[in-house]
C-alpha cells in the first residue's frame, strides 16, 4: 500500500524538480573606460543542461568590440535519463495501482501478474540507482560550470587587473538538489518493495514448500522410529519375564519328586 501511495508522488517530485528547472546568473564587467562597461550580464540556462550551447556576449574593454562566451559542459545525457526513468516509473505506478484495485483476480491468475510485477520492480530499482547516481554527478558538473568565479575566468576582460569583474548573483540550485534526494528516495522505495512483491509470486510459495517437506519427513520418520522402539521394548521385557520366571508345570514336577519317594519308603 505504501508503494501504491508514495511511488507516483516521489516520481512526480523527481522529474518535476529536474525537468522543470530554469536558472541563471548575473555578472558585471567594469572597464576603465566606463562607456565600455556592462554591469548586468545575464546568463540563463535550463534543462536539459546543454551548457556548451549557452552563449552570451561580454565587453572586452578594448573599444566597442564584444566577446562571445559559451559555458563549458554538457550534462544532458544524465539529466534526460533521470527524467525518463522518473516518467516511466510514474506511469507504471499508476497502471499498477489500477490493476491492484480493480483487477486483483486477473493479477493473480496463473501467477503471471506477480512475476511481471516482481521483474519490473527489480528493473526500476536498478534504473533509479543508476539514474540518481548519474544525475548527482551531472549536477555537480553543472554547479562547477555555472559557478560565477569559473565563468569570469572565461572572459578576456577579466584577465586584466585594471578591469573589475564580479558576480551580481549566483544560480539557485535548491530544486536540483531536491531532485537528487527524491531520486535516491525512489530507489529506496522500489528496492524495499522487492521483498513484498516476491512474496506474491509462485517462487516464494514453492520455496516454502521445499523447506517444509524435509521437516515433515524428518518428523514422521522420528515418530515411526519411536513407535518401533517402544514396541520392541515392551515385547522384549515380556519375553524376559516369561523366560526367567518358572512355569507352574515345572514347579509341580519338582515338588512331586520327594512325595513319591516318601510313599515308596
Image: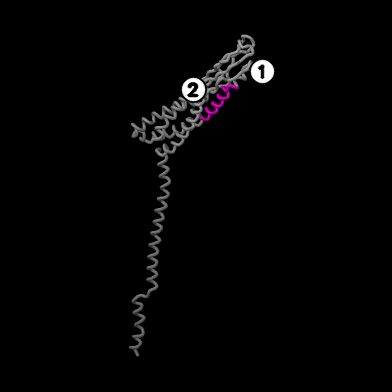
Residue 254 image offset from top left, x and y in percent: 36, 81
In the image, 187 versus 111, the foreground residue is 187
Residue 196 image offset from top left, x and y in percent: 42, 38
Q: Which mark is residue 117?
A: none
Residue 125 image offset from top left, x and y in percent: 47, 33
Query: Position of 252 compared to 170: left or right?
Result: left
Identify the element where label 2 is drawn: loop
- Report the residue at 36% width, 31% height from top: 99
Residue 209 image offset from top left, x and y in percent: 40, 45
Residue annotated with mark 2: 21
Quadrant for residue 32, please give it: top right
Characterize the magenta stretch by its predominant secondary structure.
helix
- Report the residue at 35% width, 78% height from top: 251
Q: Earlier in the sequence, mark 2 or mark 1?
A: 2
Identify the element where label 1 is drawn: loop
Residue annotated with mark 1: 161
Query: Position of 146 compared to 193: left or right?
Result: right
Tell me, yes or no, whether the highlighted magenta stretch contains residue 126. Answer: no
In the image, 255 versus 216, the foreground residue is 216
Query: Badge 2: few (under 14), some or many (20 or more) residues near its Cα, within 10 Å?
Result: some
In the image, 224 versus 149, the foreground residue is 149
Task: Measure how far apart labels 2 and 1 are at the Cα level.
Answer: 36 Å
Q: Which residue occupies the extreme right position in the image?
A: 161
Q: Which residue occupies the extreme bottom position in the image?
A: 265
Quadrant for residue 143, please give it: top right
Tell me, yes or no, whether the highlighted magenta stretch contains residue 147. Answer: yes
> Of the residues tagged 2 and 1, which is closer to the observer?
1
Q: Which residues are magenta?
A: 132-149
Amino acid at each position: 500500500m505504501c508503494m501504491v501511495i508514495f511511488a507516483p508522488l516521489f516520481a512526480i517530485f523527481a522529474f518535476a524538480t529536474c525537468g522543470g528547472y530554469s536558472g541563471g546568473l548575473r555578472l558585471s564587467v567594469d572597464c576603465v573606460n566606463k562607456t565600455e562597461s556592462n554591469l548586468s550580464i545575464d546568463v540563463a540556462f535550463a534543462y536539459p543542461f546543454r551548457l556548451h550551447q549557452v552563449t552570451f556576449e561580454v565587453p572586452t574593454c578594448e573599444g566597442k568590440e564584444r566577446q562571445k562566451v559559451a559555458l563549458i559542459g554538457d550534462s544532458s545525457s544524465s539529466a534526460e535519463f533521470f527524467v525518463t526513468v522518473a516518467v516511466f516509473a510514474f506511469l507504471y505506478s499508476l497502471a499498477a495501482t489500477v490493476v491492484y484495485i480493480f483487477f486483483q483476480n486477473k493479477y493473480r491468475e496463473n501467477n503471471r501478474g506477480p512475476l511481471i510485477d516482481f521483474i519490473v520492480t527489480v528493473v526500476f530499482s536498478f534504473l533509479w540507482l543508476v539514474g540518481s547516481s548519474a544525475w548527482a554527478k551531472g549536477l555537480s558538473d553543472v554547479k562547477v560550470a555555472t559557478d560565477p568565479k569559473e565563468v569570469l575566468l572565461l572572459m578576456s576582460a577579466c584577465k586584466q587587473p585594471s578591469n573589475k569583474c564580479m558576480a551580481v548573483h549566483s544560480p539557485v540550485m535548491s530544486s536540483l538538489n531536491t531532485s537528487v534526494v527524491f531520486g535516491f528516495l525512489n530507489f529506496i522505495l522500489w528496492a524495499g518493495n522487492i521483498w513484498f512483491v516476491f512474496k506474491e509470486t509462485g517462487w516464494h510459495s514453492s520455496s516454502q514448500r521445499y523447506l517444509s517437506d524435509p521437516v515433515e519427513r524428518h518428523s514422521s520418520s522420528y515418530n515411526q522410529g519411536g513407535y518401533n522402539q517402544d514396541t520392541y521394548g515392551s515385547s522384549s521385557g515380556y519375553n524376559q519375564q516369561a523366560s526367567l520366571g518358572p512355569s507352574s508345570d515345572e514347579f509341580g514336577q519338582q515338588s512331586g519328586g520327594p512325595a513319591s519317594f516318601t510313599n515308596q519308603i
